[in-house]
Amino acid sequence: MEQAAQLLYDQIQNNPVIAAVGNEEELSLALDSDCRVVFLLMGNVLDIGSLTRRVHESGKLCVIHLDLIEGFSSKEIAVDAIQKATNAEGIISTRGALIKRAKQIGMAAIQRGFMLDSRSLASFEQQIAQSKPDFVEILPGVLPKVISSLISRIDIPIIAGGFIHEKEDVIAALQAGALAVSASSPNIWSV
């Protein structure tokens, strides 16, 4: 594991709940929370640097969901631009080319996949075999059987996200083998 990925892994080991923020109010709450890692699901080409700086100034690691940042393309150069503008520890993306580029330049790479049925699970396995991310994030995160199944077939840490609203959801995902959960519900961030 590269340095940025290892740093992220270590912080997740200390607190397996990741604050996933999509607006200013959530960001403020996340910065005051016990979470050690923040997933930025908001921003644009003009403000992503200042948003990341705020996360870092609060002593937390920042991972940017590049697919959700307005003004960036889906080309590999967007990863270089994010690294230069933000010094974020990593990116999240559904796009394998962006994951590969992040790893090439030393950023942690989290590939996100949506589990709709058994075909989407098989397709996701093929995608991660090609892109070789440091972590995978599967959504929805309230699928313990899918988490267990995927863990038995890949050797990449899993983050469960989506529909994590109660403490029981966190426990179920972690018991199924997920390394961590990402949640946009502030009441989960202190679990």
Image: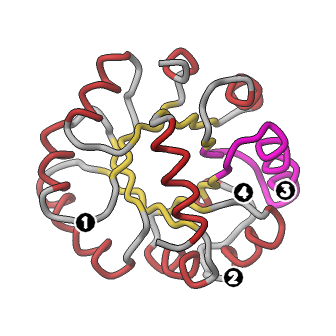
Q: Say which residue label 2 marks.
A: 77
- At numbered mark 4, what does the secondary structure look like: helix, strand or loop? loop
Tell me the distance, in whole angstroms, between the alpha carbons under discs 3 and 2: 16 Å
> Quadrant of residue 163 in the image?
top left
Q: Nearer the viewer, mark 2 or mark 1?
A: 1
- Inter-mark Cα distance, 2 to 4: 15 Å
What residue does disc 1 label? 155
Residue drawn at (19%, 55%) of the image: 151
Residue type at tag 4: Glu
Q: Residue at x 32, y 82 (%)?
A: 130
Residue 115: percent from left, percent from top? 25, 49
Q: Position of residue 188 (x, y in %)?
A: 49, 20
For disc 4, the marked residue is 70
Residue type indicated by callout 1: Asp
The region drawn magenta spans 39-62
Q: Nearer the viewer, mark 1 or mark 3?
A: 1
Q: Residues within 10 Å of mark 2 (few under 14, many from 20)?
A: some
Residue 49: numbered disc: 3
| Magenta span includes 179 | no
Q: Earlier in the sequence, mark 1 or mark 3?
A: 3
Q: Is residue 149 left or right of residue 166?
A: left
CA separation in Å, label 2 and label 1: 28 Å
